[in-house]
Amino acid sequence: VWANVKAGPPDAILGITEKFKADQDPKKINLGVGAYRDGNGKPYVLPSVSKAEEILFKEKLDKEYLPITGLASFDKLATELAYGEDSAPIKENRLAVTQSLSGTGALRIGMEFIAEHYPNKSIYLPTPTWGNHNAIAKRAGLTAEKYRYFDPATVGLNFEALKEDIKAAPEGSVILLHACAHNPTGVDPTQEQWKELSQIFKEKKHFPFFDMAYQGFASGDPVRDAFAVRYFVEQGHQILLCQSFAKNLGLYGERVGTLSLVTASPEEKARVDSQIKLLVRPAYSNPPVHGARLVSTILSKPELKEQWLGEVKEMADRIIALREKLYNKLVELKTPGEWGHVKSQIGMFSFTGLKPEQVDQLAEKYHIYLTRDGRISMAGLNDNNIEYFAESVSKVVKG
Ligand code: PMP
């Protein structure tokens, strides 16, 4: 039956994990996938999550279906974490929220909603961006357009080009913004630059489509990392937000997040809610219950929430310390080039500036795996492998 089905290309990021697994060398390092690792290179279950697991186990809850839009307490607490408890759309009951299959699911349903209900059928994505954004836009029926974001020369933000492109986009364009810890570059606008962007969005009547997959991972403080989202809302923008708990609570496989849209009134919210349900029901009926209960338990218990905030900070700080170490080591080894960006970039990734051929050499000669755009997941490094990594990079760059 499937004789004519052509083999598809492997996923750019998950394909790397496959190659890594097949490599038998004990020195091998996987810096491809964006998942946090502890100081021993092992997956990390947050102690606050383990505590919440124990609490839930004792409650002996049933496994009934959730409503289409998910667990109500989760939807409330999750969006309060993003928008702030005093956020006007929450207080005024005009935030439409649905629990999503993590960030990816929020993006998919969010883009489908745009495709169905917004006049423009295209979405502007930064260059570069998380590869899946393009694929999701296409599947949702949107045309992916580009705006400039990153300057390879400075390995930093090209703010002038970014503004130029956003100003040149037709009025009312949908523009995707990484709320913090931009993936893959680790380069974010400053708070002043966000304010300028908000002004341009107002003038151009653009629609801000926020993707926030790393709240807490940029600065170690979820409130600080929500600056752009909260500022845009305060300024009256009716944003759409995709929120993920994969990274900041380490709940990758639980698939827990939210999709939310700021609307103009409770009545408009109700209509938007009803249309979101019509997208979710035929896609997966209703979201999984366990992850939402975990998040809800942690965010509703002050002492557990406090503990979690400490753990997020610990993860972010470990990555910052690794950046410092990697930078020092690369400089010590007299690696040609300027490596300051390794320290200045934020979040889970560093966009090293390594060329695709150099990435290939790292895999072939040194058993080190990363995406061909030169992005490394910082958390894949630790005291046991960082020297070997820096030495290998240094050798490859020296040629
Ligand atoms: N957006 C961005 C920018 C991401 O980097 C990721 C995760 N790699 C996601 C969304 C979604 O991840 P998840 O579906 O696991 O929440």
Image: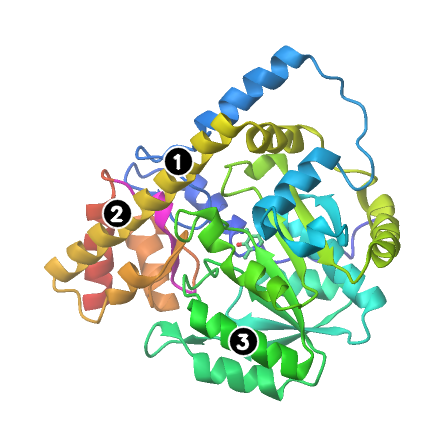
Q: Amino acid at mark 1?
A: Gly
Q: Is residue 231 above or below residue 121?
A: above
Quickly name the residue at label 1: 310
**Which corner quadrant holds the C terminus?**
bottom left
Q: N-terminal of the two: label 2 or label 3?
A: 3
Q: Amino acid at mark 2?
A: Ala
Q: Residue 352: x, y in percent?
A: 33, 63
Q: Nearer the viewer, mark 1 or mark 2?
A: 1
Residue at left offset 67%, top offset 55%: 88
Which residue range is magenta in the image?
373-382
- Check disc 2 and report its element: helix, strand or loop: helix
Q: Residue 57 shows which numbered tag?
A: none
- Check disc 1 and report its element: helix, strand or loop: helix
Residue at left offset 31%, top offset 32%: 40
Res. 269 visible in picture: yes
Quickly name the residue at label 2: 321
Residue 376 among magenta residues: yes
Quickly name the residue at label 3: 197
Q: Amino acid at mark 3?
A: Leu
